[in-house]
Image (cartoon, helix red, strand yellow):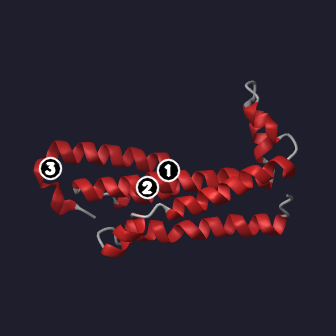
Amino acid sequence: MTVDAPLLDLLFTGANLFVLPFWTLMVLVPNTKLTRTVMGSLLPFAALTGLYLFLFVTSFSNVEGIEGLSDPNLGLSDLAALFANPHVTATGWVHYLVFDLFVGRWIYWQGQESGVFTRHSCALCLFAGPLGLLSHLLTDALWKRFAGGNVGEAVG
């Protein structure tokens, strides 16, 4: 199946918009029943993973040289050339969206379970995934060290 540019743009934009409500809930209203209910579901990940699967599979017929990703001698310039293709970039971007949201959800639930403040880490995870994870790991370690058993009052 060939994915044309307008459809690819629509899928890319749709994926970006799709994740925003989840991030909004985790950052702005983390302690509400609505947020806990929505973030308790794995359906958003199933939907994004389905989109990723579609883009991944269709990239084999849409992108010349996609098999280069499995080349053990793939260099940085070769990878950059592959990502110059919009289909590969869209596929990679959805990959980031899925994993950043998954890590953000993990951070959110860690905070809900332990009482550790997570809003800043979730916001960082939205914009720079690994930095959000690092922020949470540091925040969690500091809360455990300095707040002891009194972390419950710092939730949110």
- Residue for point 79% across, 55% down: 86
Left or right side of 39 for 83: right
In this figure, which residue is indicated by the disc labeled 3? 147
In this figure, which residue is indicated by the disc labeled 1? 129
Q: Nearer the viewer, residue 32 or 79?
A: 32
> Element at badge 3?
helix
In the rendered image, the quadrant that contains the C terminus is bottom left
Query: What percent of the width, then of the height, locates residue 39?
Result: 41, 65
The local crowd at label 3, few if under 14, some if 14 to 19, many if 20 or more residues have their Cα within 10 Å, is some
- Residue for point 16% across, 62% down: 153
- Residue for point 29% across, 69% down: 31
Amino acid type, callout 2: Gly
Q: Foreground mark, 3 or 2?
A: 2
First in sequence, mark 3 or 2: give its number: 2
- Residue for point 34% across, 72% down: 29
First in sequence, mark 2 or 1: give its number: 2
Amino acid type, callout 3: Ala
Instruction: Report if the CB atoms under discs 2 and 1 are less than 8 Å apart.
Output: yes
User: Can you see residue 116?
Assistant: no
